[in-house]
Amino acid sequence: MLPAQGRAVTDPRLHALALSTPGDGPAVVAQAPARVNLIGEHTDYNGLPVLPIAIDRDVLVAARRRPDDAVELSNVDPAFEPRHYSLRGEIPPFPPGDWANYHKAAAVGLRDALAREHALPGGSFRVHGTIPIAAGLSSSSALVVACGLAHLALADVELPRLELAELLADAERYVGTLGGGMDQATTLLARAGHALHIDFFPLRARPVPVPTAAGFVVAHSLEPAEKSGRVRGLYNQRVVECRLACALLARRTGVAATRLGDFPDRVALLADLARLLPETEVPASALPELLGLTPDEVRVRVLGEATLAAPGRFALQRRVRHVLGEADRVAAAEQALQRGDLAALGDLMNASHRSCAEDYDVSTSALDHLAALARAHGALGGRLTGAGFGGAIVALVERDRVAALIAALDRHFYAARGGRSDLRLPVEPRGGATVARME
């Protein structure tokens, strides 16, 4: 086996997955970690920063090259049925929610990006994952990244990690979700022992050391957050509400802005928000007059064609209040990490959860309850992580109290819900994705 980036390959799972992958000849195995966002929720697609870590749950994709342009896709978990398709011509998605659409997303994005210089080969791909699904830990983006890295390795092509993160973030929109670029960037660029401060448009990232005294626990609410299924319309609704708010703010302030992160004085904007944006929901019928656009221009330039949960009404003021406040919390959280001030970081995480619940409407009663339980049993901070609408929380706790917090969550949350001990876990910041070649 020839390890990527000069690393020794010691994980026996890589060997086992490669051996079970159909075909002859050399195999490649890509490994992409899950991510946990410590703070900075729904800021990435608004051009504002995030502060995530990668963790030691991951997706592995083994692949062998085929002599044709066919893709054969299988999963170690029999719940995910085999799929096949051709890389030739148009590649329509499978039905919404199909797991194989994430492989198609990577393949379509790479094929189109490399078309002038490289032909993307067909291949047999086998997938194994340890990331809880629909937990807000980016299992979908880890799958996209692992598939993308495996396919690039089959084509004997390397791309700079920043470039690949942007490419795959765009590619993942193939599944119909208007996501930002946090997940792909974290999975590709993470460094062990560090959080990652990520800025967008253009994509930039810098590591932020995490104090050794900090411990983190991820706990699933037992409510799935399926961004390719039920949650897609809710998620896209928030993206479009921010677009609408940005367009209205640009018109009323005279600032040429396409994202909320483009406004130069966000402190003044936040202070003047009550005057600039309506407090109540705006009906779709009022948008043309508010924005000074025709109905067709509103549809094409702002609303787009994405599936929305409530296309007839839009909340603007509360959405912007969350996004701008969250960006400030990210900056303060980075400073708290640098000082080793875990209490301050915990307070910021708690404030972030309140804002996600009250202004962005992405929390649930189960997430609220789980975060409150964590705080009541020793966590310095607890907040939903990921897009919300279900999924998991991340709790900050002193490292020597991690086991006690997990035991308390077991007693007060999971015991009455089937005792799912696999859905709460201690996590530490780990490094980013890798690729290994087997000869």
Image (tube, helix red, strand yellow):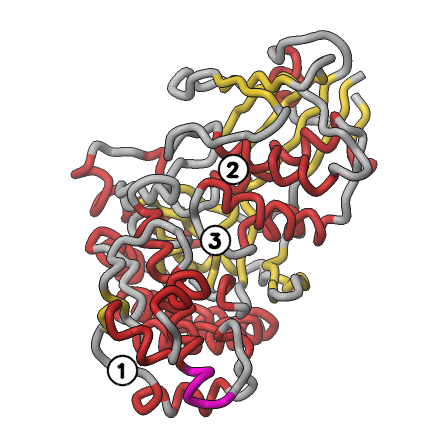
The CA span between labels 2 and 3 is 21 Å
285 inside magenta stretch: no
Where is residue 16? Give x, y as percent.
62, 15
Residue 255 position (above or below residue 423) = below
Residue of label 2: 57
- The amino acid sitting under disc 3 is Gly
Q: Secondary structure at mark 2?
A: strand
Residue 170 showing in the rendered view: yes
- Give the position of the N terminus as an image quadrant: top right
Residue of label 3: 179
The CA span between labels 3 and 1 is 26 Å
Q: Judge by depth and name the residue closer to the eye, 375 or 150.
A: 150
**Residue shown at the point (54%, 68%) measured from the top left:** 47
Q: Judge by depth and name the residue closer to the eye, 341 or 88.
A: 88
- Alpha-carbon neighbours of circle 1 within 10 Å: few (<14), some, or many (≥20)? some
Q: Judge by depth and name the residue closer to the eye, 174 or 97.
A: 174
Where is residue 138? Give x, y as percent.
47, 44
The range drawn in magenta is 249-254
Where is residue 164? Give x, y as percent.
69, 47
Mark 3 or 1: in front is 1
Residue of label 1: 278
**Residue shown at the point (37%, 78%) measured from the top left:** 291
Earlier residue among tags 2 and 3: 2
Mark 2 or 3: in front is 3
